[in-house]
Amino acid sequence: MKDRQELPVIDDQEVLSNTGQSLGKKIPLVSDTLPLLQVKELKKNFDLSGDLLDQFRFRGGRIIRHKRYIHAVNDVSLEVMPGEALCVVGESGCGKSTVARLVMGLLRPTRGSIYYRGQRIDKLSEKALLPYRKKMQMIFQNPYASLNPRMTIDQALLEPIRFHNPDMTEGELRERKSEVIKSVGMDPSWGNRYPHEFSGGQRQRISIARALMVDPEFIVADEPLSALDVSIQAQVLNLLRKAQQQRGLTYLFITHDLAVVEHFGSRVAVMYLGTVCEVAATKTLFSTPKHPYTQALLSSVPRLWDDQPRHISLPGEVPTQIGQPKGCVFQGRCPHANDRCRRYSPQLNAQSDGSLVACHGIEEGRI
Amino acid sequence: MALLEVRNLEVSFRTREGIIKPLRDVSFTLNQGERLGIIGESGAGKSILAFAILNLLSRPGYISGGQVLFDNQDLATLSEKRLRSIRGSRVAMIFQDPMTTLNPVMTIGQQMIESLRAHRKISRKDARVIAIQKLKQVQIPSPATRIDQYPHELSGGMRQRVTIAIALLLDPLLIIADEPTTALDVTIQAEIISLLLDLCVSNNVGLVLITHDLCVLSQMTRRMIVMYAGRIVEQGPTKEIINDAQHPYTQGLINALPQLSIPGTELKQIPGAVPGLQHVPSGCAFNPRCEFSMDICTRVEPGFTCSGGCSVACHMVEELVNSMGEDL
Amino acid sequence: MNNAELNPIKDRSMVESAVVGNKGVLRAQLIDGFKRDKFIIFCFSLLLVYLLASLFAPVIAPFNPYDLSQVDILDAELPPLWEEGGDPRFLLGTDAQGRDMFSTILYGTRISLLIGVGAVLLQTLLGVAIGLTAGYFGGKVDSLLMRIADIQLSFSTLMVAIIAAAVFRAAFGEELYGELAVVILILVIGTVEWPQFARTVRASVLAEKQKEYVEAARVMGFGSSRIMWRHILPNTLSPLLVIFTLQIANAIIAEASLSFLGLGMPVSEPSLGALISSGFEYIFSESWWIAVIPGVVLVLLILVINLLGDWLRDMLNPKFYRM
């Protein structure tokens, strides 16, 4: 057990000096193969301070430049193994979508690093990223917003592949397009239609097809089901699974729906307030959740045939993380929090069953 | 005694493409203190039903047929003035997004006191006391200080608690809750579910819960209605329907739940998509997506068949029940 | 007040989108709305008449007002046909120099529309490029460009035009100015009023940028300019169409004002504004038609364009749109 001295908390101030300290923590590999994607101590702050002029405050007779940040992602380390579906689950504001966008290079991390097949990708220019864009694709939450309303289905599908493979002939393009569009269960003859002519489920199929067009090996799916009707969710989930089997895809699957996680994920990472509190194989997590937050989360999921809801009640609600967090992010709502939890943030520690848990209580055997 | 009785309710929307009917032939009764769940996907007409019950539809929608009997008065034909006295005081509504109910420029207290005084002749002081007491009932910590806060100062879960407190303010007989927990996180949702349930039971308030989440519905209600494309397809005791659904659509909805299938296997799915309001298929609206679809299903809209404690609108069930009747 | 009544029907949007569909149906919706509204059909036809008349002015006009050999000073100040003393050759009478009013108005409308459309095209080009850049890149680029827009807006069009015209005349002489007047007016009016477009485009871009299809395009690895011009711009066109229309009316007014003040088109090549100006001194000397007829033509043109613009705005604004 390595205990890291918590940095002095300078509220509302960006602390840039702690890069020097090694926060490195080896996360044991689940399998022996190399991870496809590796995220190390990822950190993302969003600046809330506004214009330069707004940042200056008059305090105690002096003018002070005051900056405020939301710490959306705090020291997140994850590994995605080839062929698996790693689900990142958490409530709104836990930073799970930010992790997805950081991995895809849509946001630049404040600190930390991202490796794809051992190559560092977080500092690459847009141009140097191009080869990775073919390998890594993303599926978005809202099928009504993720397709350009002014582009036909054909245009939307063909543009990326033309862009990435300029020497493909027109015939090859057509062939690829109809193969992909059939594989998502759509009719290739609908190519000249616009997105508004399709239902939400069909649109989500189209955006999956768009991601599959460039033949990726890794897909980040950001809540791909949450905007869909129940009967359509099952269709899309089946489609994602089929694509995984047929094309050997690896998923980073962001969701808030634990039922979907249980069904779809091979491993689960539970996030709370920008940090990972538990990573475990799906079966292990659902049978023996360890972190108090995971336990509360699982008990809150409404189940069928359950007349008497017996959930673990958590006091309070998810706070907003402004300023450097102090202690364990969950301590404000945790029934087991003690003084150590309030002062030092816990690190992910390997458990006997292979899961990783960040909790002082479990470390000490209190819980 | 029936608290609410909806008889053959029909809602129409006048559009330039002609009149469309997002709600057709809806009938059900709700007894005092009973909790009824209405489930359906988008476009099923469940939210329109909620508005139609209170006669709150605004242009271009209107009630084009049927009755809504609340306490033996037909809300569909009542004058706006009489309706106003019923809405809010005897029937209350809770919405998905609390911010649509709460006025952002008034404190919670001001809003609660105003509603109270609009319906009852009491002093500001007494109203405030009642308001604080209601806030306490929904387990808001330190209600006496919270009451002077503005809605934006509260978190999402707290706001939904406040809307529940406002709904309970005038001791209604019936609460209509339209997706009350959909916008909330799971841990908060669990809290709100148990709160709403406790309040309904302890105050003997009737509840019409409108939701798309079968699990939430199964926890909160004793009876349920399944809607599809503006019509009721199945109605009966919640337990019975969930354990042994008769209508193929209900079966599909239940089977599509990931939590009921073995992890890693293919989910049972309903093919196709929910039809748009102007393209409702003829005959049984579900027939293009139904694996048991027969010739008659494409032509004739099925009537209701009683099967066990449920009433089901399905030709297949009808035939089944009839053949069983002959066998006996 | 009861809480339920505070709520507009929530399902409205759902019903509406189910019934109306969205963007792609827009065209059908516009055409449909157009067919229903008799007044708009009338306005549109009138605008079409204006456009055709100015396009085919050389064919329609019985005289060429620019050709001095066709003008006879003896024909000066003849009243319109229906007035006493009207000459059958001159439908709308003649001006102080003996030019046929009908021909001159046709040519004048042609010039006014040319300047109006030309200036607005220039505004669009500048405004769209600047607005897209500001909205897409945001941050310092955005602040800088929008401050420039603010500064630009604080100069009135007329003031800039007056100074530009005066400087040009002083530097290159009256003759060259006369030859290049159309171009100069297009340049001046075009460069002064781009902030209107830039702001509208920027606002739309800010809204569109949030949508996931832009992120999807970035994930595909597309470059910024491709995303800006091919993905975002087509989705900002509806509001642009509205200002485009309204700005044409504004540009024509600006040109007319300048010409009226004697700073726009020269008398030898009059626009509608210049015509009104030249007729103004005769307005009390019985020859009212020299100023009034071009005035009516101008007002009608502006009115028609503005009405069409307002109608477009209503049609494209989903809140205004009612079934």
Image (spheres, rainbow, N blue to C red):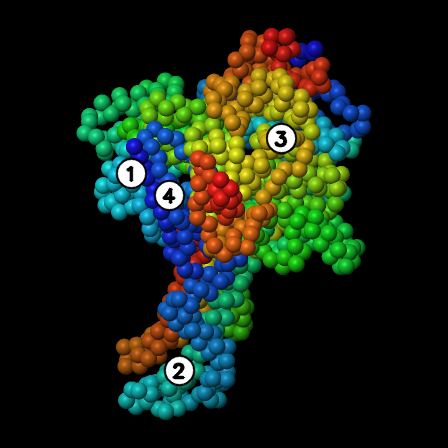
Categorize mark 3 by other alpha carbons within 10 Å: few (<14), some (14-19), many (20+): many
> In the picture, residue A28 is in which quadrant?
top right
Q: CA distance from mark 4 to mark 1?
A: 13 Å
Judge depth for marks 1 and 2 and give the one in front.
1
User: Where is mark 2, residue-wise?
Assistant: C101
Q: CA distance from mark 4 to mark 2?
A: 75 Å
The reply to whether the C-beta atoms of the residues labelled 3 and 2 are less than 8 Å apart is no
Q: CA distance from mark 1 to mark 2?
A: 76 Å
Q: Is residue A299 left or right of residue B112?
A: right
User: Where is mark 3, residue-wise?
Assistant: A261
Q: Which residue is at 48% across, 22% downward?
A: A309
Give C175 or A133, whichever is nearer the viewer.
A133
Give A32 or A117, whichever is nearer the viewer.
A32
The x and y percentages for residue A248 are: 76, 38
Above or below B60: residue C262: below
User: Where is mark 4, residue-wise?
Assistant: B27
Q: Amino acid at mark 3?
A: Val
